[in-house]
Image (cartoon, rainbow, N blue to C red):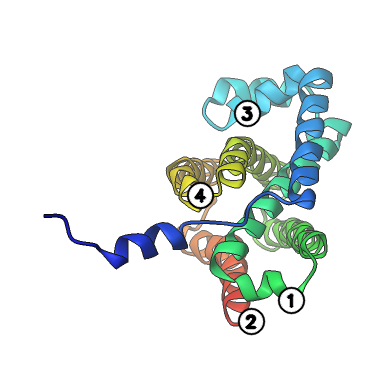
Amino acid sequence: MFTHNPYSELLFETSLIGRPNNWSVIILCALLLLLTLLVTSFRNKLYLTLRALYSQRFYAQLLREGRIIHERVAIFTLLFDLMTLSFGALLCMERFAPKVVDAFSYIGLYGMTFAVLLALFFFQMLVNNIYTALFDHPKEYNAMYLYKYIFLTNVSFVLFPFLILAQFSGQFVVLYAYIPFFLVDFGLYLYKLMKINPQKINLFQFFVYFCTLEILPYVLLGKMVSMY
């Protein structure tokens, strides 16, 4: 005879996220519109960007196309990236920090999350500039910036369909399936940074720099949100 297990109900209950509301649908539609614009207007460079993290040939071809980080495609792509990551962060807050979501309006919290990620992105670029200047790696700055752009684009484009499935199914567990993709891309991103100029890189300096700049800020943000 089967017995009732209350813990199974708790497991499924806590895996839920908020059902789609007007603002979440508007945000996803805006992202879909922006994605359509990118695919129709910048198909070739977008294709190269999405392949460059996995193939040195595509990375070299992307470099030959010009300084993409100074072109319009980079502006629209970074906008899509940060908007997507902000929405993902919002779903995580709905799941793990509902008090934060209840304290603000939905779109207001989304806007604040986007502003924080945007400020953090430019802060990281500034620190990259300082790092390359202090340790005599000025030629590496553009490569570090480009790989950052490539990494953000890859993780955001993979995350987008997971966000749609999670939001409209109401099951946060869908986002757990995204974690392996993120870890693979993050590992490749770290490897590519270390291969930019291996003769000049001090591994200890690079490890401290990378953990401080790329990991610590997000850990601190997560800690601040969880303490709210």
133 sits left or right of 181 in the view: right
Tell me which amino acid carries mark 3: Leu
Dot 4 falls on a residue whose secondary structure is loop
* Label annotation for residue 103: 1
CA gap, disc 3 to disc 1? Answer: 37 Å
In this view, the residue in front, 152 or 96, is 96
CA gap, disc 4 to disc 3? Answer: 28 Å
The mark that comes first in sequence, 2 or 3, is: 3
Q: Nearer the viewer, mark 1 or mark 2?
A: 1
Quarter holding the C terminus is bottom right
User: Residue placed at 53% from the left, 53% from the top?
Assistant: 201
Within 10 Å of the Cα at label 3, are there few (<14), some (14-19), or many (20+) other Cα atoms? many
Quarter assignment of residue 17 = bottom right
Dot 2 falls on a residue whose secondary structure is loop
Dot 3 falls on a residue whose secondary structure is helix
Tell me which amino acid carries mark 2: Tyr
Q: Which residue is identified by label 2?
A: 228
The mark that comes first in sequence, 4 or 3, is: 3
**CB-based contact (under 8 Å), mark 1 and mark 2:** yes
The mark that comes first in sequence, 1 or 2, is: 1
